[in-house]
Image (cartoon, rainbow, N blue to C red):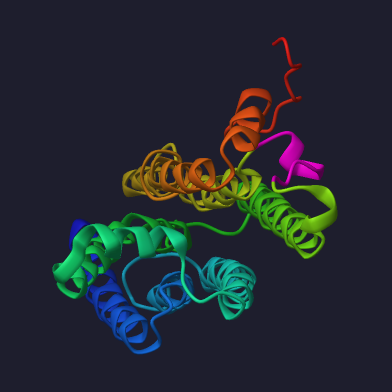
Amino acid sequence: MTLWGLAAAIAVIAAAMSLIMAGAWAIERRTGNSGWVDVTWTFGVGVTGALAVALPLGAGPVERRLLVAAMAIAWALRLGLHIAGRTRGITDDARYAKLRQDWGDQASYQMFRFLQIQAGASVPLVLGIVLAANRPGALGWQDLLGLAVFAAGWIGGGLADRQLAAFIRDAAKKGPICDVGLWAWSRHPNYFFECVLWASFAIMALSISGYPLGWLALGAPAFMTLLLTRVSGIPPLEEHMLRKHGAAFAAYQARTSAFIPLPPRSAKG
């Protein structure tokens, strides 16, 4: 991929995601349920990534392009369907509801602006997909390693989501805080495995020689980790959980790793 190809990829991705998130804003305004924003974003990223690898932007072989496109679609289907199922059972997403409350009379405009910023923030993720698909050379061990890391993230994220869903269905008997399975080792195992999954595209894109632009794919897992741990993932969610559950969640914070799965700390630790 040349610099011109890179510029074209960024332009196409940015335009596509801007339109998609404008659609997410319209859906949120019509339904009043901001949970559909994340559903739209997830499918939008996956479909944009899968379609963008078909553009003549680089020299990646057809086999790698098809593999990477399939990975992008697999990611979007699992996560998007999970979020859609969760959204059908709620009236609104607490994080977006808090933002709307803070924005007051400017909520509609500020939500549109926020989602356009989110569209721009999606560019490093989709670009990671495109860069992975366009690494020159035949399929080899590097692609297998990337696929294995993708599978670990995909399976781990799905397991974490299923464990949480099962807990919520029976929360009256188990208490307000999910601390079973992977959730006993990490307060956000779904976020951890999401970041693992995105590392797979960087692994497939990297090249010691002949493809320097591939190193830009490191931006995908780096940005996803920053987003989930510092911006729109852990901070607002934990703020909401503390408001809702108080001391019970504070105790969970004290004994459980925030992100990377680690053995639970003792009460004295």
- Compare residues 144 and 208 and report the one nearer the observer: 144
Name the dominant secondary structure of the magenta segment: loop
Instruction: Give the magenta-colored segment's residue range.
Output: 177-186
Percent x, y of residue 247: 60, 32
- Compare residues 127 and 254 and report the one nearer the observer: 254
- Please give the name of the residue rendered at 23% of the width and 63% of the height, measured from the top-left corner: 114
Percent x, y of residue 107: 21, 69
Instruction: Using residue 188 as the reference point, say whether residue 110 is left or right of it.
Output: left
Percent x, y of residue 45: 42, 70
In the rendered view of the protein, which quadrant contains the N terminus? bottom left
Percent x, y of residue 3: 20, 56
In the rendered view of the protein, which quadrant contains the C terminus? top right
Q: Is residue 222 visible?
A: yes
- Please give the name of the residue rendered at 24% of the width and 74% of the height, measured from the top-left corner: 18
Q: How many marks?
A: 0
- The residue sitting at the right extreme is 173
- Compare residues 69 and 162 and report the one nearer the observer: 162
- Please give the name of the residue rendered at 42% of the width and 78% of the height, measured from the top-left corner: 54
- Please give the name of the residue rendered at 76% of the width and 25% of the height, measured from the top-left corner: 263
- Asked if the magenta segment contains residue 182, the reply would be yes
Vertical order, 229 against 49 (above or below): above
Q: Is residue 210 visible?
A: no
